[in-house]
Image (tube, coloured by chain):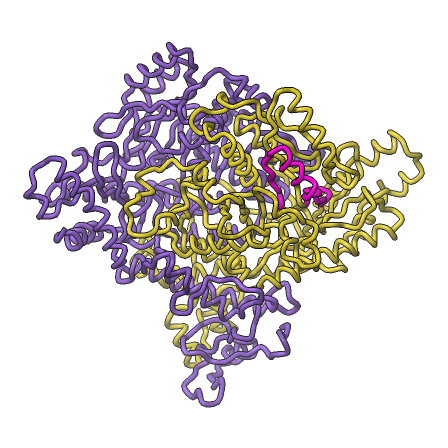
Chain colours: A yellow, B purple
């Protein structure tokens, strides 16, 4: 053990019980059945309550410090105990989903929790306290009553996968430094392409840092396929290209159009039906209109599982139109892609096999820890051709292995985080059938909520149709509003209900659910299920709780 | 404990000793000093060698399964033991840096290690074996003799930070679901801006998924600043804009130009001196030339720490030119940015305070685990204005807190991984002075290598100048080549030396160092130091080992 600043490393009892972190001597004593007193005045102290005192130990005592093994061992076990305690709280319905504080409160410091950085190191004891505080004031995204985002839950095998990924601390750009992960990515991409219905040998793809970037890839590749000169000459060499999305699609297509130099004005919004599905006739009408204007329709983004309504665009009709007018068909299945694993529900994505590219985020419905998003493309080699610049210092062609496994030049990144291992490990642990079972369960919860909402008199559905995905959208109508006749005044007041209930719910920390307006609809709640910990009783709780928090509004 | 398929959960002794994973009964026995036999026929088994047998336990037994706490505890502790054993091996010079196998070997399966995915779940025992195998066949990027990339080492506090980040499993897009991390990002961005020399209240930034994306942001923001109409109308509404980089700069600027619709042809390469530094006069000459062609010079990317030579462009002269011609000045300090923390070496980035934007990757010289890259911009609000689309379903303006802390609309992503916590935790644990000490040490190692190379007769420096960063570039000249007079034949043979030595080194797994050609220079080795575990003796080993592997060539 390296001695820090002349102090001895100090092992003494603390108040909480801990299985790890004893000295070798203590371990030996434990093995031989010794039950000792650790320090005078601590008569009731058992061996198991002896943990390392980190107040005199610093980061510089950890590996690679000489003889740093033991200290590293103790420290990491202590961290893991903090995390395990957090994980158990996460799953405990009695614990708060969130202990909310405003930004200025956190910046000013709370009960000794300071986020300030200093010149000198803090001892490891403080680092452990920092870890506890960070978790204390965060949101428990794995809590059974956290419904705030499409990604929720905390999969233990996925977590283990992330921990291993962090320890491996490598980069996906070349095979030589990430051989196993590169091969796993290949296996996963092939598997996902096969599930979509593409011939796997022809398909290709990449894991990217989220669905927005995956959608950006789709436009990038579509543009390159039609106009390879884009790469060298830029948009100025191209005709006026136009993209199509539905009014319920994710905003990332517009964002990508801004980034890629296409411009948001060149993204046409196609109308949806009342259920949030793109209307194919309106797509065809818009394509013809754009053509008449002398512009070039290039690309359609259909959505399988819209963010708010959970709607599935009619892919077969859209594919027919794309074929007829020679448009690139992208399917944003970031949210709904998981349904492909369910024999009961996969029909909702019928036609996806006709897409040119697909975004599918395992970090949503499949419950993989963030981040894990796949961009999949039917034509092999296109991604590489579109993005490669052949930087000699990184992608040496004269390496001793098959350098087609160096994936770095397929991407718009250079270094790339290993997002695939946790998904691979989860797939091994659940099997395809395990994912199917979980996803079917989420849909049953949505079905249950939908039926409950139809029964309860203070709730109103945003659209009355059985959920196709796990999204269920609804208003809570407080008693005071029931008296007011339909009209602008009632709409104005209803618009304020969800934000007020949300603020109270966050303040109390009992649950988290998101709300938003959409089109001409005033603020409504959007429930989504993607957490295995959630049960029907949590759905009951949600509805009771909204009533409790909102009945006086 | 949920019983899987009618089987009892089974605790029985296995051959290796393990501190964790015993049943409650065993824990009680341990506490009371009991030293028992776990199963008949295992007479020498102590309590400590009792670990859970995971062969009948499945992922479905883990949390959130009812009574899944214990199983989860055992499983995660087992994973952590695997990781701890890996970490110790990583730091052990006697262990291989890499146990190399070709892609087809990994795909076909090795000694029972199969990467295939199946319909049915594997028991947790297999999942643990998978974890061990994944690590076994990977590259140990924290090994003291892994010099292959700019990112290396395995910082234990950073690792703990990643583990916590994974358990928190949240997303940076809104404050409500990541309050602590959002505040930490604010603190870190301000700190980094302050270190650059900007008035922190005016500066802004974002953590992005890597240096290439950060560099992409710089062009995106520069373009928007000069031409805000780009967002709606695209590149067609702009004049012919031109970007400037040096011939030693990172390829990501060209890649971004392709992505952003600017085109690689509109990126002008400025000449460098023999040391790899941009020549300001050549920049000025090119700007004037472009102007004469009727094009609009928009942006210069200067580099502080080039990838191969580790060169620092003369920022003050470049800033003068940018000011004179009204160009956006970006500094790509992805690699060299860490030097700002060293009072001894920060002068090499003098002038960086005049930049409009900076890329700085803490996952490189500062040793933060991958990924951790900051894009910093001097003008506050520009990033938001450039990227925001105000998606109502995510960024509700009527939330109960100050929604300027919702960072999601500043980015080109939607969901964004939490990359900041590990950096924050490391900063707390090391202090600014800790980073300084480490970085100074890396530069001393480079200095040592440089001096050794000058002494050893079979080595030749690519350029003879004291290292400014930790890069040292050199050829090994095998005895057989020393006979051959300088000329094309010798060059041709020398070009093959590094790849051959690298192949042998990878095959034997004794170390990893990268090589590449550059400009008119044939393949040479590039050494970099960014791993705290590396010592001078490892530098000696490197040189001896290259001789050993290459002397017969």
- Relative height, residue A492 to residue A86 (above, below): above
Residue A312 among magenta residues: yes
Number of marks in the image? 0
Tell me what residue is drawn at x 50 percent, y 17 percent.
Answer: B226
Residue drawn at x 44%, y 82% is: B46
Q: Nearer the viewer, residue A71 or A512?
A: A512
Q: Which residues are magenta?
A: A305-334
Q: Quadrant of residue A354?
A: top right
| Farthest front residue in view | A324
Estimate the x, y position of residue A483 in percent, counting from the top left.
94, 38
Q: Is residue A107 visible?
A: no
Q: Return the x and y of residue A129 as percentages of the image width and height.
A: 51, 53
Residue B227 location, x and y as percent? 52, 18
Question: Viewer-proximal residue, A198 or B496?
Answer: A198
Residue drawn at 67 percent across, 49 percent down: A349
Q: Is residue B62 magenta?
A: no
Q: Nearer the viewer, residue B129 or A4?
A: B129
Q: Is residue A243 left or right of residue A65?
A: right
| Residue A5 on image: x %, y % | 32, 52
């Amino acid at each position: 053990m390296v001695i820090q600043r002349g102090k001895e490393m100090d092992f003494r009892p603390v108040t909480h019980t801990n299985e790890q972190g004893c000295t070798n001597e203590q371990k030996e004593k434990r093995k031989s059945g010794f039950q000792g007193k650790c320090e005078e005045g601590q008569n009731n102290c058992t061996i198991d309550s002896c943990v390392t005192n980190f107040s005199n130990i610093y980061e510089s005592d950890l590996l690679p410090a000489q003889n740093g093994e033991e200290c590293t061992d103790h420290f990491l076990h202590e961290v893991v105990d903090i995390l395990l305690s957090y994980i158990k709280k996460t799953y405990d319905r009695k614990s708060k989903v969130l202990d909310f504080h405003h930004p200025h409160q956190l910046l000013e410091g709370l009960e000794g929790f300071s986020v300030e950085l200093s010149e000198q190191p803090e001892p490891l004891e403080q680092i452990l306290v920092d870890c506890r505080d960070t978790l204390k004031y965060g949101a428990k995204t794995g809590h059974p009553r956290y419904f705030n985002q499409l990604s929720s839950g905390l999969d233990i095998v996925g977590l283990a996968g992330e921990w291993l990924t962090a320890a491996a601390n490598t980069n996906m750009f070349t095979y030589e430094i990430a051989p196993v992960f590169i091969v796993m990515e290949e296996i996963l991409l092939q598997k996902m392409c096969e599930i979509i219905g593409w011939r796997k040998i022809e398909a290709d793809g990449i894991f990217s840092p989220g669905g927005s970037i995956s959608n950006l890839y789709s436009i990038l590749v579509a543009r390159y396929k039609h106009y390879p000169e884009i790469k060298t000459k830029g948009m100025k060499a191209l005709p006026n290209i136009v993209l199509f999305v539905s009014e319920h699609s994710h905003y990332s297509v517009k964002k990508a159009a801004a980034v890629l130099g296409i411009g948001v004005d060149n993204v046409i919004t196609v109308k949806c039906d009342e259920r949030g599905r793109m209307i194919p006739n309106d797509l065809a009408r818009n394509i013809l209109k754009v053509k008449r204007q002398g512009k070039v329709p290039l690309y359609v983004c259909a959505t399988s599982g819209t963010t708010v309504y959970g709607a599935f665009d009619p892919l077969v009709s859209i594919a027919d139109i794309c074929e007829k007018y020679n448009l690139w068909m992208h399917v944003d299945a970031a949210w709904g892609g998981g349904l492909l694993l369910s024999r009961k529900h996969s029909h909702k994505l019928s036609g996806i096999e006709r897409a040119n590219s697909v975004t599918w985020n395992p970090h949503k419905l499949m419950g993989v820890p963030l981040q894990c998003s796949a961009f999949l493309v039917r034509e092999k080699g296109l991604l590489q051709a579109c993005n490669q610049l052949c930087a000699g210092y990184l992608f040496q062609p004269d390496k001793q292995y098959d350098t087609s496994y160096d994936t770095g030049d397929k991407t718009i990144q250079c270094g790339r985080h290993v997002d695939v291992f946790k998904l691979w490990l989860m797939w091994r642990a659940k099997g395809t059938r395990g994912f199917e079972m979980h996803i079917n369960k989420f849909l049953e919860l949505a079905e249950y909520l939908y039926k409950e909402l139809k029964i309860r008199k203070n709730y109103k559905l945003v659209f009355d149709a059985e959920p196709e995905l796990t999204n269920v959208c609804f208003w809570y109508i407080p008693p005071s509003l029931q008296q007011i006749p339909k009209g602008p005044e009632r709409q104005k007041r209803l618009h304020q209900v969800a934000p007020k209930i949300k603020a109270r719910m966050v303040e109390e920390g009992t649950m988290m659910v998101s709300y938003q307006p959409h089109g001409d609809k005033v603020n409504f709640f959007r429930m989504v299920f993607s957490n295995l910990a959630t049960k029907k009783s949590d759905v009951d709780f949600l509805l009771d709780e909204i009533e409790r928090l909102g009945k006086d509004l």
